[in-house]
Amino acid sequence: MFHHRPRRIAALAITGLALAAGVSTTAFATQTHHVKPEPKPTVVLVHGAWADSASWSGVVKRLQADGYPVTAPATPLRSLSSDSAYLADYLKTIKGPVVLVGHSYGGAVITNAATGNSNVKALVYIAAFAPDKGESTADLVGKFPGSHLSDDRNAPLPTALSPVPFTQADGSTGIDLYIKPDKYRDVFLSNQVNRAKAAELAATQRPITAQAVAEPSGTPAWKTIPSWYLVANNDHTIPAAAERAMASRANAHTVEVDGPHAVALTDAHAVTRLVEQAATTR
């Protein structure tokens, strides 16, 4: 019946010390209570053309290991307006703050989808388009030299792309654009991935419509939401000079890495580090 006495004596001793020091037992309890850390924002990873959500795998693993909620929804790649509306609706299903990350054409999508969404605390562009109002992704590629999408500026279609006509829901004809398999390793990967892996990625690439790359962008979210930008300085899809110009215009916190357009595949660590920087900056 006396086995609880040591605990009671210890409790009385602590209370006595607190009272002797002029600290109430309530204050003492408050001071020793550990404050629960704020929940981390949800990171939403948005892929672009000629890739899919699996292109984020290395980044997803690292973010999850660091305790971040992560999602990488599919981008339809049908038109900039409809793709952006789709993502905007998707974001409404997420509670709490969001860090929105876009790669390539996915950057144009997040630029439009985040406008007016107060939950989006940061935009992160990974070798991505950050268009201003009225600009298309095709416009931005053409403004700077260095892209390997075409070796003939006068050609009606970039020479590295293969058009595939398809019938749309309204009966009209659309055009899907694929990177030619023999061009994929150079254009998308800057020859930094072995041939077997490049061939696999080329075979599973998601096409984008000609309409999507030509459609003008709307009001850009980067004018009101803090932005971060990773420049891939060996990018053969979007010229690095274009990336630097877009990053500067958006007043983005900018880093550069020696990577290809698909930099999340070759340097997931650098991509993750920038995303986490955006997530933790107040």
Image (cartoon, rainbow, N blue to C red):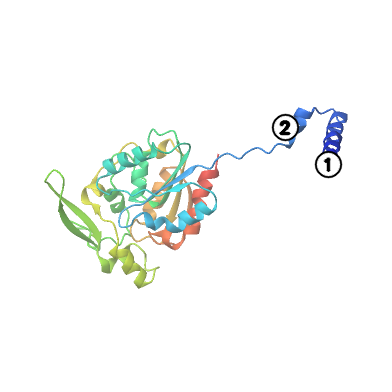
Q: Nearer the viewer, residue 57 or 185?
A: 57
CB atoms of marks 1 and 2 within 8 Å? no
Query: Which mark, residue 85?
Result: none
Q: Earlier in the sequence, mark 1 or mark 2?
A: 1
Kind of residue indicated by mark 1: His
Query: Which mark, residue 30?
Result: 2
Kind of residue indicated by mark 2: Thr
The residues bearing labels 1 and 2 have C-alpha atoms spaced at a distance of 28 Å
Report the label total.
2
Q: Position of residue 83 (x, y in %)?
A: 29, 44
Q: Is residue 183 above or below residue 52?
A: below
- Counting other residues with Cα less than 10 Å from the Cα at mark 1, is it few (<14), some (14-19), or many (20 or more)? few
Is label 1 in a helix, a strand or a loop? Answer: loop
Is label 2 in a helix, a strand or a loop? Answer: helix
Q: Which residue is mark 1?
A: 3
Rendered residue at 45%/53% (across/down) = 230
**Does any portion of residue 155 appear in the rendered image?**
no
Q: Is residue 117 above or below residue 207?
A: above
Q: Quadrant of the N terminus?
A: top right
Residue that sits furthest to the left in the current view: 171
Q: Position of residue 203 (x, y in %)?
A: 28, 65
Q: Quadrant of residue 234?
A: bottom left
Q: Quadrant of the C terminus?
A: top right
Q: Position of residue 281 (x, y in %)?
A: 55, 42
Rendered residue at 51%/44% (across/down) = 279
Q: Quadrant of residue 185?
A: bottom left
